[in-house]
Image (cartoon, rainbow, N blue to C red):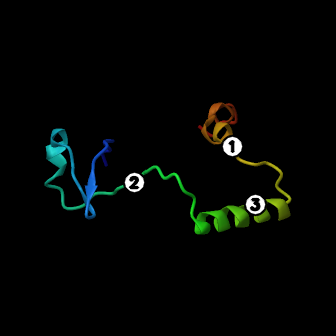
Amino acid sequence: MYAVEFQAPIENGIVHIPSQYHEIQNNTKATFVVMYNTDKITTEQNNINDELDTLFANSNNQVQVTMDLATNTNDMINDGIL
């Protein structure tokens, strides 16, 4: 599986693939990960965050994952995981 990253407009649900990636336009299937910016947090997102905070508060696991912990592979390498 190959991966490419690009920014493209979405118009009426259609993603416009840049011309430099013309070789993928003839593929019949692809996996998409869509990342987008939003300035407003929805009520549903707030409810999910509240639920996660409650679960964490009731957990006996006192380690809260941060971006540094999630992306720092040094400890994994030292532990023989990687």
Gap in angstroms between the C-alphas marked 1 and 2: 22 Å
Query: Between 34 and 69, which is closer to the camera in this rendering?
Result: 34
- Identify the residue at horizontal 72%, vertical 64% (top origin): 50
Residue 31 point in image, percent of width and height: 33, 57
Q: Which of marks 2 and 1 precedes in the sequence? A: 2
Labelled disc at residue 80? none
Along the line of sight, which residue is nearer the eye, 60 or 54?
54
In terms of image quadrants, where is residue 71? top right
Which x, y percent locates residue 60?
A: 86, 59
* Residue at left offset 69%, top offset 43%: 66
- For disc 3, the marked residue is 53
Neighbours of disc 3 within 10 Å: few (<14), some (14-19), many (20+): few
| Image location (x, y in percent) of residue 20 | 17, 38
| Residue at image mark 2 | 33
Classify mark 3: helix, strand or loop: helix
Label 3 and label 1: CA atoms lie apart by 14 Å
Find numbered disc 1 in the image and state the secondary structure of the residue it sits on: loop
Residue at 72%, 67% (x, y): give it: 51
Kind of residue at badge 2: Val
Q: Is residue 63 left or right of residue 81?
A: right
Residue on which disc 1 sits: 66
Q: For the residues carrying marks 3 and 1, which lies nearer the camera in this image?
A: 3
Task: Tell me where residue 44 appears, x and y as whole percent.
Answer: 59, 69
Find residue 5 and report its image quarter: top left
